[in-house]
Image: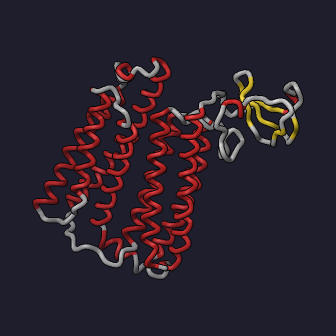
Amino acid sequence: MKKHFRTIAKISLFFVYLIVIAGAVVRMTGSGMGCPDWPKCFGYYIPPSDVVDIEFKTNHDYKEGIIIVHNKELLVAKNDFKSSEDLDVTNWTKYTKHDYAEYNPTHTWIEYINRLASVLAGIPILIMVILSFWFFKRNKWITISSILVLLAMAFQAWLGKTVVDSNLAPYKITIHMVMALVIIAFILYIIFASKNSFKNQKTDKSFKLFLLIAIGLTLIQIIIGTQVRQYVDEQVKAVGYIEELWLANPTLQFYIHRTFSILVFLLNAWLYLKNKKMNLGFNKMNLVMLCIILEVITGIAMYYFDFPFLSQPLHLVIGTILIGIQFYVYLENQKDFIHNLKNN
């Protein structure tokens, strides 16, 4: 079973990144409230595909928990019942967790696919947890980390519910994003620690220290980026889909985000050159620089070319890939420490 463990862990990592991609598309399209309730969608396991499905129907069998939109309010069926010719308010209760009561079938299905990706991710993660017990005697931290990933996914699902219930509160979206990065970090540790052997790479104290700083800067960039994205969302609501106006009057967070990008580039360029000069053997630094260059390109495209199609989700997804690669390189720098954990 051990020989399949790393494969399952890599599949788990793929699905977590798939959730990040789906979430980025949700943000880009403004579909976060496509399903106003959680975990169901308008009370259904498979969401409605037409507006008539969430309007009141006469002589219709309603199940408990089904949601309809009536007079710009969400109404929830109290019990199973068959409707009469007129809407009987005694059969319904107002949905009070938020006041968002709109229906857009495109938004609904985009949000539903996002949730479906989260459910599918749970399957390989659960298998990974089961298989991790074969490693307990060899390295108990692999088993512990696998269990923590499963618990973190459950917590992430609960966070997703609170995000919907709060009608996309900005700070909850940020916490949701950071939690995804924590899950990615744990899975990357599992993938690295379960290797049978490590590459013959040199460790360097200054490289390791500044790499850790670079990871911190990338994390700060992602967090500030979610705040910039929130400002863009507010601009969309205020001025509509006139892309050239979204950053016409940027906030302080935008300028901090742009300035930090210079620091991120310079620090990682220094790490890249040091790795080359000292022959440390961390080949993934090439991918780090590629991600940073792509981040710069998508950032420039959004600001100077009025948000070309897919530039926003690409910018976010590349950022999460970047910090994942940086963390894996840091693990490679910690291989002696991780190797010693096996014996404790």
Left or right: residue 268 versus residue 235 is left
Picture residue at 44% right of the left edge, 61% below the top: 186
Picture residue at 56% right of the left edge, 72% below the top: 130
Picture residue at 47% right of the left edge, 24% below the top: 234
Answer whether residue 33 is visible to the viewer in this image: no
Report the quarter where the C terminus lies. bottom left
Answer whether residue 130 is visible to the viewer in this image: yes
Looking at the picture, tell me which residue is in the foreground, 261 or 94.
Answer: 94
Looking at the picture, tell me which residue is in the foreground, 2 or 46.
Answer: 46
Measured from the top left, where is residue 113 in percent x and y?
55, 46
Measured from the top left, where is residue 56 in percent x and y?
78, 29
Picture residue at 23% right of the left edge, 44% below the top: 293
Measured from the top left, where is residue 268 in percent x and y?
22, 49
Looking at the picture, tell me which residue is in the foreground, 248 or 169.
Answer: 248
What residue occupies the far left of the structure in this picture? 277
Quadrant in the picture for residue 165 = top right
Left or right: residue 232 versus residue 170 is left
Quadrant in the picture for residue 150 = bottom right
Measured from the top left, where is residue 172 in percent x and y?
53, 39
**How many discs appear?**
0
Left or right: residue 44 versus residue 250 is right
Q: Reply above or below: 79 against 287.
A: above
Looking at the picture, tell me which residue is in the foreground, 291 or 280.
Answer: 291
Left or right: residue 72 versus residue 277 is right
Q: How is the image coloured?
A: secondary structure
